Amino acid sequence: MKKTGIIDLTSEHLEEHSSLHTPYSGCLSVSKRDKALNEINDRLSKALCLTPDRQFFLAPLDPGSGKTSFLCEFIRKKKSEGYFRKEGILLCFSTKVEIEKFITASGLDEADFAVQTSDHIINGEGLGYHAANDAWVLLTTHQMVRHHVGKSFEKAEKFYFNGKPRRLRIWDEALDMAEPVSIRLDDIGSLYGPLRLHHEKFVETLEAHIPSSAIAIVGDTATIPSTLIVPSKSEAEAVFGKGDARIDLLVKLDRLKGQALDIGEDKRLGKALVGHIHELPDDFAPVFILDGSGRLKHSYRLHEAYRKNLWRLTPYQHDYSNLSVRHWKRASGKTTMLDPSQRREIVEAAAAQINSDEDEWLVITHKDDDGKRAYSLHDEIKGLVDFGKRRVCFIHWGIHKATNEYADIKKVMVIGLWRYPESVYRATYRASTGMSANLAAPADLDALRRSETQEHLLQAVSRSNVRNADAGGICGDAQVYIIAPAVMLNDAMLMETFPGCSVTPWTPVAKALPKQAAQLVEEIKRQLSGGTSSIAKKSVRDALGIKASALSRHLREKPVQDALQEHGIRSRGKKFEISIHPR
């Protein structure tokens, strides 16, 4: 075989360099978890010594697999072998909190590491921000890398060790090649009036190149001129005041200059520009991605298929046979919760289940939005829960990752699921493939929606005792109660998210329909099965032998409306259709 000086870490070439291998924990176990960690250890060890192919190496490791402990031990081992004098390591975390946790867990000496973030306090850890070039291990955030890497990682001196790029790069949790961005056209329009007086050229340029929501055509593209002069932050604050959301909007517009943006549409939020920013350069590879949701995310499959520089390492997933999932197939999103009667039904059912035992519970909901809504879901549930001497803990979507604070809790209540606007999925497609979302196959967009829902559910539920797997990889005992519509989460998705778990219906509120109404709902469900997204109301009437007036009467009945909503079905004009946006 011809020697090129570049070692292929994706093939049998690993065997040639077996002397570089250091088994993880010296363990000869044949468990799936140890196999996965040993392979990662082997490849990381070789990457410190030899230049691998420019690949994004994905290591899918379920939450609770011990990746943080593994990283700490790996670095300690390599230090003892003298690598701290040779090649540098870059560790990229999602938040500053994760960096602080790693510093504590790793036991690194101050002379071993430095930190680079936007926080001057944590930057004082180790050798200090300004001595990063001398630190063998550099800890930073995903955002810092994206903001400072530019078009070439190897030219980004900010991340150098001993005057050269760090050889080993490790990315903790999910990696997208770029940051997806979507901007509502209505929001762009909100800039014009306030800015026109003092920034007339800016407004006129945008108006000439970005169509208004009224005339924009979904599927077209629009380009923000690269020569556009965007008002500075201080100029924007003088117009809008500090903290106004339109200031961040101007920042996004500035970063999107010169990019051909897709025009997409959110059925609830209107038309939007879809693009991406902070794309990672190809020479950021080789990088090792340790992602707890890596086996589920469709964005990696797109990256693999279109960019062709992602390589999957041996995956590890828990056996979830100790997890029991109860699913109430009911709408539970933010719009549903605005209806007091529907919210009361959900809150009372959740509280009744929590009060049915004396166990500790973790409750996961949407954020209350700091008083912007006329209700507080957390407060309403707390008002009905009998706390006694036990813990009932509450977290919201958005802070549902990367904490072990609730790892001893065995009961979880999930009310509503994490869902993005449609334009975000289209932007994610662009970021993953480097291609226009207007070219996306509907099946890929649908797979993105499903996989993102699954990813967030896995991460949220894994805050509980589920993450405490035994030596055989069997997850900790746990029961999860989920309130979410079937169109967003079905049994097959649950089984894929938690392989081996048991899934059973949960119907805390009995809703018996009259015979004719029940027949109507079943017929609509039957005709919409098998992948059909819409059916004519006439076909339902014909199948049941009823008149249009009888169908209209049934559709005005609240139990029928609720039954259709639970299955993600809506009545629209002369059709019934599956809604991809159940609320």
Image: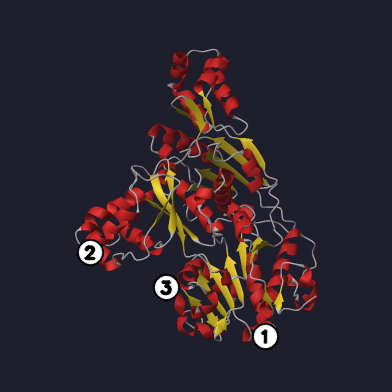
Q: Amino acid at mark 3?
A: Asp
Determine whether 449 is above or below 206 in the image: above
Q: Which residue is mark 1?
A: 82
Q: CA distance from mark 2 to mark 3?
A: 26 Å
- CB atoms at circles 2 and 1 under 8 Å apart? no
Q: Which residue is mark 3?
A: 119
Q: Which one is in front, 556 or 515?
A: 556
Q: Which residue is mark 2?
A: 238
Quarter of the image where the C terminus is located: top left
Residue 538 screen position, x and y as percent:
51, 19
Q: Characterize the local packing of mark 2: few (<14), some (14-19) or many (20 or more) Cα atoms within 10 angstroms.
A: few
Q: Is residue 426 left or right of residue 309?
A: left
- CB atoms at circles 2 and 3 under 8 Å apart? no
Q: CA distance from mark 1 to mark 3?
A: 31 Å
Q: SS for tag 3?
A: loop
| Residue 26 appears in view | yes
Q: CA distance from mark 2 to mark 1?
A: 55 Å
Q: Which callout, 2 or 3, points at the residue further toward the start of the chain?
A: 3
Q: Residue at x 71, y 51 (%)?
A: 319
Q: Amino acid at mark 1?
A: Gly
**Colouring rule applied to residues:** secondary structure
Q: Amino acid at mark 2?
A: Ala
| Residue 393 appears in view | no
